[in-house]
Amino acid sequence: MDTRFTLHFIAEKEGQLLREALTEWRISKRALTAIKFDGGLLTVNDVERNVRHPLHVGDRVEVKFPPEEKSEGLAVEHGELAITFEDEAILVLNKPAHQSTIPSREHPTLSVANLVCGHFQKQGLASTAHIVTRLDRDTSGLLCIAKHAHIHHLTGLAQRNGEISRQYEAIVHGHVAQDIQSIIAPIGRKETSIIEREVREDGQFAHTDVTVLRHFYLHDEPMTHIQLKLHTGRTHQIRVHMAYVGHPLVGDALYGGSRNHINRQALHCVSLKMLHPLTGECLHFTSDLNEDMQQLLNDSLA
């Protein structure tokens, strides 16, 4: 059985070259190169054609992408995935805390990417894990994975156009004074660390919206339950921005938070909105807070 990822289109412009039509259908130059040299196929009305072929209105165009190979450092592993949504194009997962999105030297196994490769293998997909919305190891909640390089290309375009929206909830130290605020401050890597980030003038533009949900006390310590919307996706963005305004995330030891109440940063992706990369359908996924964060909120009411 041919497991290559395949898309179908109908020509709408008389005399248009196949190359021009493929560009309008958002097939990248990189994908066309891979199709030509790595085992893909372009057909018009079931006949193989090259990109210089002129189309007629109503022609049926089939694009077969070559099989994908995972990187050598990505081991195929099998394990449990909390799947929120899946179709032929994307996979949306509810990631637990303490699980890496991709393998690292410190945590080489059982990452989301490793398990997704195992999931794809069971399905017989000639594909690898393409992370669309990445989460830090200790951040829980929704993340999206593209099931093919072309889908990853489309979701990348969507992200650059602001068409993928993520909302988070967090618990931070102190009582945040402003009910609604926007933090616009550039983020770059701290010169003394390969992991830590900081707000710095030469950093990349970063924009986070913050809304206060509730002020409370936990064992006489002031805390705030907040909702956050990301407009950019910089590494550690929420953690850096909240520490920058004097309210580090509870449990975030790297950026000044205390682990007296929770053993990871209290951060969860609760909402993911996007247009389906193939159908254009509006998709909206939600996720309840993890038990450890919910317990913090419950303890504050006790």
Image (cartoon, grey):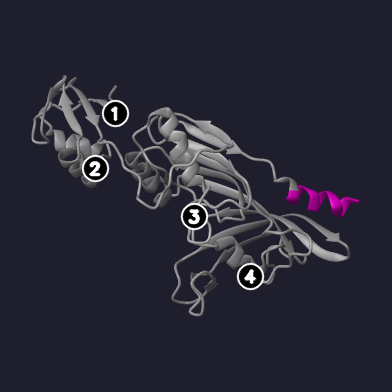
- Residue on which the image places disc 3: 108
Residue occupying image coordinates x 85% and y 54%? 300
Furthest-right residue in view? 302
Do tag 3 and tag 4 residues touch (Cβ < 8 Å)? Answer: no
For this rendering, which residue is in front, 80 or 209?
A: 80
- Residue on which the image places disc 4: 255
Do tag 3 and tag 1 residues touch (Cβ < 8 Å)? Answer: no
Q: Position of residue 2 (x, y in %)?
A: 28, 25
For this rendering, which residue is in front, 81 or 171?
A: 81
Disc 1 and disc 4: Cα gap in Å?
45 Å
Residue occupying image coordinates x 28% and y 36%? 67
Circle nearer the viewer, 3 or 1: 3
Q: Which residues are magenta?
A: 292-302
- Residue 136 found in image quarter: bottom right
Horizontal side of 257 relative to 283 (left or right) equals right
Disc 3 and disc 1: Cα gap in Å?
32 Å
Disc 2 and disc 1: Cα gap in Å?
12 Å
Disc 4 residue type (three-letter):
Tyr
Residue 154 can be seen, yes or no: yes
Horizontal side of 111 relative to 243 (left or right) equals left
- Asked if residue 32 is positioned above or below residue 3 in the image, the reply reads below
